[in-house]
């Protein structure tokens, strides 16, 4: 099958409010990464209540179970609204992040004086 399927993977306690000076706070559930998704995937997060001190970063992580957690691509959050992380096999700049491992999770980190609310998180990957 060659279909791209979107899924809501928002944290069970969404919306998630992330205060200042936090590292790798989960804002999604763990989700399975398909064979197609391991090569090309899009993560979308809807954020609000942004207060930017030194910075807010959205990050995709992948793992095999609870072991071998690998950090993947990140996106800086600079305004309220939609934030995207796109990993595409066709992009030479994404090659160092691929292939992703079998489980994914979206996390967020904030610096001093920064805060954000993550309302929803979606993943789009090939089945």
Image (cartoon, rainbow, N blue to C red):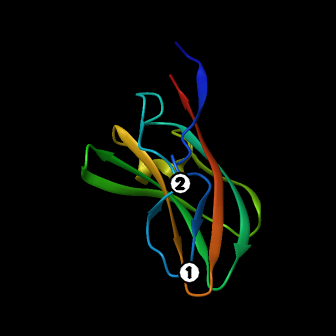
Which mark lies nearer to you, 1 or 2? 1
Viewer-proximal residue among 48 and 44: 48
In this image, 69 relative to 106: left or right? left
Counting from the top left corner in percent of width and height, residue 122 is at: 61, 41
Counting residues from the N terminus, which is met first, the one under dot 1 or under dot 2? 1
Q: Residue at x 46, y 36 (%)?
A: 39
Q: CA distance from mark 1 to mark 2?
A: 30 Å
Q: Looking at the image, is 46 positioned above or below residue 123?
A: below
Q: Residue at x 53, y 54 (%)?
A: 93
Viewer-proximal residue among 102 and 51: 51
Question: In this figure, which residue is indicated by the disc labeled 2?
Answer: 93
Q: Are marks 1 and 2 in contact (CB under 8 Å)?
A: no
Q: Is residue 99 visible?
A: no
Q: Is residue 7 visible?
A: yes
Mark 1 surroundings: few (<14), some (14-19) or many (≥20) residues within 10 A: some
Question: In this figure, which residue is indicated by the disc labeled 1?
Answer: 20
In this image, 125 relative to 104: left or right? right
Which element carries disc 2, helix, strand or loop?
helix
Viewer-proximal residue among 32 and 4: 32
Counting from the top left corner in percent of width and height, residue 56 is at: 60, 72
Mark 2 surroundings: few (<14), some (14-19) or many (≥20) residues within 10 A: few
In this image, 7 relative to 101: left or right? right
């Amino acid at each position: 099958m060659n279909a791209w399927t979107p899924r809501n993977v928002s944290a069970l306690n969404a919306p998630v409010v992330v205060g200042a000076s936090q590292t790798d706070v989960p804002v999604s559930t763990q989700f399975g990464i398909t064979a197609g998704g391991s090569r090309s995937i899009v993560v979308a997060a809807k954020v609000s209540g942004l207060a930017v001190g030194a910075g807010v970063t959205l990050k995709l992580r992948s793992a095999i179970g609870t072991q071998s957690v690998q950090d993947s691509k990140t996106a800086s959050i600079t305004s309220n609204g939609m934030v995207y992380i796109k990993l595409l096999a066709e992009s030479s700049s994404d090659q160092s992040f691929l292939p992703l491992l079998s489980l994914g999770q979206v996390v967020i980190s904030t610096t001093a004086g920064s805060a954000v609310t993550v309302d929803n998180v979606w993943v789009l990957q090939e089945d």
